[in-house]
Image (tube, grey):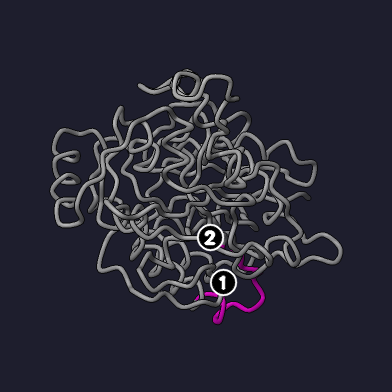
Amino acid sequence: MGKVVLVTGAARHLGGRFVRRVQRDPEVERVVAVDAVEPGHPLGDAEFVRADIRRPAIAKVLAEHEVDTVVHLDVTGTALGAGGRTAVKETNVIGTMQLLGACQKSPRVGRLVVKSSTNVYGSAPRDPAVFTETTPAKSQSSGGFAKDAVEVEGYVRGFARRRPDVAVCVLRFANILGPRVESPLTEYLSLPVMPTVLGYDPRLQFVHEDDVIDVLRLVAQEPRRASLNSGTFNVAGDGVLLLSQCARRLGRPTVPVLMPAVRWVGSALRTVGLTDFAPEQIRLLTHGRVVSTAQMREVLGFRPRYSTAEAFADFAASRGPGLLPPERLAGAVDRLAGRVAPGAGPIPSRDSHDGA
């Protein structure tokens, strides 16, 4: 008998991709895809069960399908369909509580994987240069997805103590990018003009959606030799990018805004429906966030295929040229340099010296 894998959040893009991919693994016998709404994408040979994880009925789904591996991907910062922030929070927190309660009652469940986020570390002016998995946050978020993720991880730790026989893995993903990813950050990066905080140029990390699927497959299986796939792991591509580099590579001009006016700009963007410029995103785009991935490599044994810069490049290629395409901007600078100093060579771009 092979594994029976239950995946929550199957109606979302990443959930659907993981469902389609994991069912091809030879050790997986069946995949049960769960969500409260019908998915708008194919799920292959997986069995879709329409169920709300906020309801106790999720325990019956685990029992009826004899599930032994649970991959909880329905922890997110964005609503699906007509749901608002309240529905998202209930799914994140109450849904996780109900799911963990169902797992605790099930004698068959032996592995639990939970999608989390580096948002749990927050973004503050006195943050360390690099967060490790054991670094406490300097400031706790009072709301939003970051607070949800902190609460979810707290409940997961409690479950791990009550069920030490279950292998529990929490993956803290950096900002996920890719051609098909939609999130408040990708909406912001897609604006024709990007508002930034005057005087700040935050460091950012990204992880490609393909690497997200690969690492989820890895931790849903038995651990490889000389590795351990239970515990908490930061997941991000190598390197960092400054927000100014991101803007140049997208060809999008930036508009620096004074700190007191940033929230007003965020409210205006939310009002017109351009992007969810939430307080936690404003903090990220002010102070940035960088995490260590040493545990991911040395303990989990996972090496992403895409670096932070490569993940961003794949995302940027899917968005089309901005108002200031990098090649046009570089050409203009070269022409200007030629007029100012005839015979001088092209001025090297800043990106060629910043290591990104």
Q: What residue is pinned by disc 1?
A: 133
Mark 2, Cα crowd under 10 Å, few <14 / some 14-19 / many 20+, is many
Q: Quadrant of residue 234?
A: bottom right
Q: Position of residue 77 (x, y in %)?
A: 35, 50
Q: Position of residue 73 (x, y in %)?
A: 50, 50
Q: What residue is pinned by disc 2?
A: 172
Q: Is residue 99 left or right of residue 64?
A: left
Mark 1, Cα crowd under 10 Å, few <14 / some 14-19 / many 20+, is some
Residue 166 among magenta residues:
yes
Q: Earlier in the sequence, mark 2 or mark 1?
A: 1
Q: Residue at x 38, y 76 (%)?
A: 138
Q: Nearer the viewer, residue 241 or 164?
A: 241
Q: Residue at x 73, y 55 (%)?
A: 302
Secondary structure beneath disc 1? loop
Amino acid, disc 2: Arg
Q: Position of residue 115 (x, y in %)?
A: 52, 56
> What's the CA distance linking mark 2 and mark 1?
9 Å
Magenta stretch bounds = 159-170
Labels 2 and 1 touching (C-beta < 8 A): yes
Q: Position of residue 98 (x, y in %)?
A: 40, 63
346 is higher (above) or lower (below) than 99: above
Amino acid, disc 1: Glu
Q: Nearer the viewer, residue 101 or 168?
A: 168
Image quarter where the C terminus lies is top right
